Amino acid sequence: RLVTDRKPRAIVVATDKDWRPAFRVDVLPSYKTHRLLQGNMPPELEPQEPIIHKVLAAIGVEVMGAEGFEAEDVIASLLPRLTGTVEIVTGDRDLFALVRDPDVRVLYTQQGIGRLLVVDEAEVERRYGIPGRSYGDFAVLRGDPSDGLPGVPGVGEKTAAQLVRRYKDLDGIIASGRLGDAANAYIERARRVGVPVSVAPVPIPKGARPTKAIDPGALAKLNERYGIGSVTERLLRALAGPPAAVRTPPGR
């Protein structure tokens, strides 16, 4: 459905090679600590991931990861190498930090693929009352319990938004002295942990999306083994459809 509705010209699937990278844990040991016991994904989904990757490889959809990095870092590292409009499909609000009009927006899947929320700078401002490119700074201040990031003590969502609006960014907030030395020390650590980084070693994507399976033999074996023929057939039909037209900016 996503391919049919959005008509992407190219597709890259980003994956975690390390869901709790050392460069984050070394700076903030609480990062995702709670998931060490419960796991990073539901147990019933974990064995499905390698199967999905094999299916995508047989079809020709690129799957990218980088050792020591999370999927969000892979996406952040790809963005400078891409041209045109990029839509990031995710249920992770961390990726809101990458929104840049007019080229980068998030398709937020909180309510499912059928009810995607398009998050651009205007939507970030509407939801959080902050400038559209300030979500990363806002999130560092507010914290994110789901990632084991406590945030600045005494700073909730409303206060975080007020601070970002008044002082523009984390450097401005630190320079103001408003929060004190302990809070500033936390901010310096958390800003290296709580937002995607763009230094993951990723290759340049191949380009156009596949229109048919590049390894039909391998795909047939996967279909037979896992009983997923109808699913992959629907995906192949969608991929064979026309992509969106290239939009030429005014004056070109």
Image (tube, grey):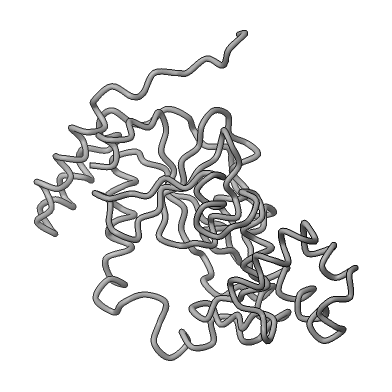
How far across and how far down the image is residue 66, in percent? 57, 57
Q: Nearer the viewer, residue 151 or 69?
A: 151
Vertical order, 19 against 61 (above or below): below
Vertical order, 2 against 206 (above or below): below
Image quadrant in which you'd find residue 5: top left
Q: How many marks?
A: 0
How far across and how far down the image is residue 89, in percent? 41, 49
Q: Nearer the viewer, residue 130 or 33?
A: 130
How far across and how far down the image is residue 175, in percent? 90, 68
Q: Residue at x 68, y 73 (%)?
A: 141
Q: Residue at x 76, y 75 (%)?
A: 187
Q: Quadrant of the N terminus?
A: top left
**Residue at the far top in the pictured view:** 251
Vertical order, 107 against 84 (above or below): below
Q: Residue at x 49, y 50 (%)?
A: 64
Q: Quadrant of the C terminus?
A: top right
Q: Nearer the viewer, residue 190 or 204?
A: 190
Q: Is residue 99 left or right of residue 233?
A: right
Q: Residue at x 21, y 40 (%)?
A: 235
Image quadrant in which you'd find residue 94: bottom right
Q: Is residue 240 left or right of residue 109?
A: left
**Residue at the far bottom in the pictured view:** 37
Q: Is residue 111 left or right of residue 72?
A: left
How far across and how far down the image is residue 75, in percent? 55, 50
Image quadrant in which you'd find residue 164: bottom right
